[in-house]
Each structure stands twice: as structure tokens, then as C-alpha cells.
Image: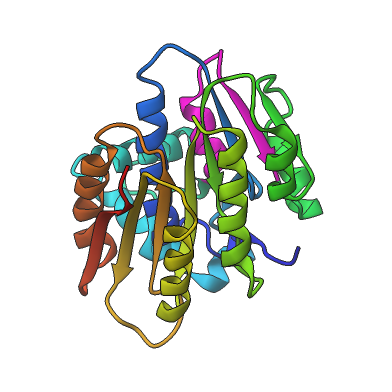
Amino acid sequence: MNYRHGFHAGNFADVVKHSLLLLLLEALGQKPAPWAYFDTHAGAGAYDLGSDSARRSGEAAGGILRLWPARGKLPAAAESLCDIVAELNPGLTPGTLPRIYPGSPRVAAALARASDRLILAELHPEEARALKAEFQRARHVAVHERDGYEMLQALTPPKERRGLVLMDAPYEKSEEFELAVAALVSAHGRWASGVYALWYPIKDDSARRRFLRRAEQSGLRKLLLAEFRLAPRADGLAGSGLLVLNPPWQVDAAMRGCLEGLKPLLAPDGGETEVRWLVPE
């Protein structure tokens, strides 16, 4: 309830997460059947990079503000992300950096067709109000001020056979890794045809290893791991990962190319990327 993503909006982990999310949604959009998008920790929808919180952290400088001058030379998914950012910042003159950065709901909404639906959960009251205001005129978007895991339990399976669940918890709780895996297993049991993308931070590598071991031992199959790491540093976020259940065909190769293309820009002092099957089909 205390987490506010505005401090971290547009940082390197956001850019990586949203680029990979776009690859997944673009793959879903290649077929005409409608899809449903669930976001368990949706946030405010869009963030002001000029706000006090964003300026205090300065994290966007290592993320979207580093990508922005390189437009035209980015991986395709990152170019798509920059196009979405440009739409949120109309009238920017050449050389001017964007001020508004999208949250994952705005990224998903940019790719949603008239037949697709977005179901968003946000528990923080102020964030939920901002999210509702962001989509107040969007009939295909439902915003719920409730626990995201509980929302998944209540609203899956949807009427659509196809879709994507983004689970993007803040990991403030020590048990968040366990809760995320349990929610993943539970939701898959109800909606086996959905694609699930579980984001996680890389801070404590022992916690990461325990989390991945739990996922391996969960009984789930077809689990793809995609990770992006900065050069080793003493504090803060060292990297992030996305664990994808039921990824679309050949998205592993697309993710690998995207992360490698982002590495020189987001990790100029050295970094690592990895895309591999944690559990094969």
C-alpha cells in the first residue's frame, strides 16, 4: 500500500519490461481473435518525470531519457515504446526530452483493438484514482481498486480464450516471491490458455535463485526466463527479469535480440542479458 511507482518510472527496468511486454502483445495481436489483458499491480497509468519524486530518484536518466536520443536505431519493441511515449508528449521539439512516461496499462492500451479488453487492479487509493481518471472514457478498460491476486482469482477465466496477465508486484513484502508463484499457479489452473508475464527485481541473488527454484518445482511447463542485468554495483536494483508462462511462438528469439540491442544503451558500463527456458514444454 505504500509503494508509489513514480519514483522509478522510466528507469532501465521499466524500459526493459515494457519493451518485452510489447513483444508479447504484438504476438497476441497477430491473430484476429480478441484478447484480454490483466494487470495485477497497474499503478497510476502515466507518470510525470518532472515530478518531485521522479526528480529525487533521477532513475529515468538511466532509462527512457537515455533511449530517447537513440530513436531510429533501437530494437523494434523499444522503438514502439518510444512511439507511445511520443504520443503522450505531443509537440516535443527536436532535442527535447519527454516529460510523461506510460505505465504498463497505457502500453497495453496502445496495442489494444476495439475487440480487446483491459482489466486493471491497483490497491493504492491515490494510484487507483489516477488510473480511473486516465481511462474514464475508455469503455474497453475496467479499473478495480482491489488486490491484484484476488482480482485474478475472481475474474479468470475471462470470456476471451486468449490473453495476457502481467504480474508486476512492488516486492515490498518479504513473502512476495512466494505469493507471486502461488498466484501464477492458481490462475493458470483456471485459465490454462493465457500468457502470463511475472516481473521480478534482481537485488538479492539468493532470493532470485529461491524464487526460480520454486517456479521450477511448481509443476508448470513452458516457462521462459528473460533477464537484464547492469554491471555489478553495491546498492540498488542490479537488474530485473520477466518469467513468461506460455510465451507465444518464437518470442524467445525476439526477446533475446531486443535485450541485446538495449544493452549498449542501458548498460554502457557493462551488463548481461539472458533468455532461456527455465522449464521447457
Residue 174 or residue 191, whichever sits in front: 191
Residue 127: x %, y % from top left: 73, 51
- Residue shown at 21% from the left, 74% from the top: 269
What colour scheme was applied to this rendering of the protein? rainbow
Query: In screen coordinates, is 71 left or right of 152?
Result: left
Q: Is residue 236 magenta?
A: no
Say if residue 203 shows up in the picture.
yes
- Region of the chain picked out in magenta, as a range: 102-121
Say if residue 75 shows up in the picture.
no
What is the quadrant of residue 176 in the picture? bottom right
- Residue shown at 61% from the left, 42% from the top: 187
Q: Is residue 30 above or below residue 57?
A: above
Residue 240: x %, y % from top left: 40, 63
Q: Is residue 111 magenta?
A: yes
Residue 43 or residue 24, whichever sits in front: 24
The C terminus: image quadrant = top left
Query: In screen coordinates, is 76 left or right of 20?
Result: left
Query: In screen coordinates, is 220 left or right of 42?
Result: left
- Residue shown at 49% from the left, 56% from the top: 218
Residue 276: x %, y % from top left: 26, 54
Q: Is residue 215 above or below residue 87?
A: below
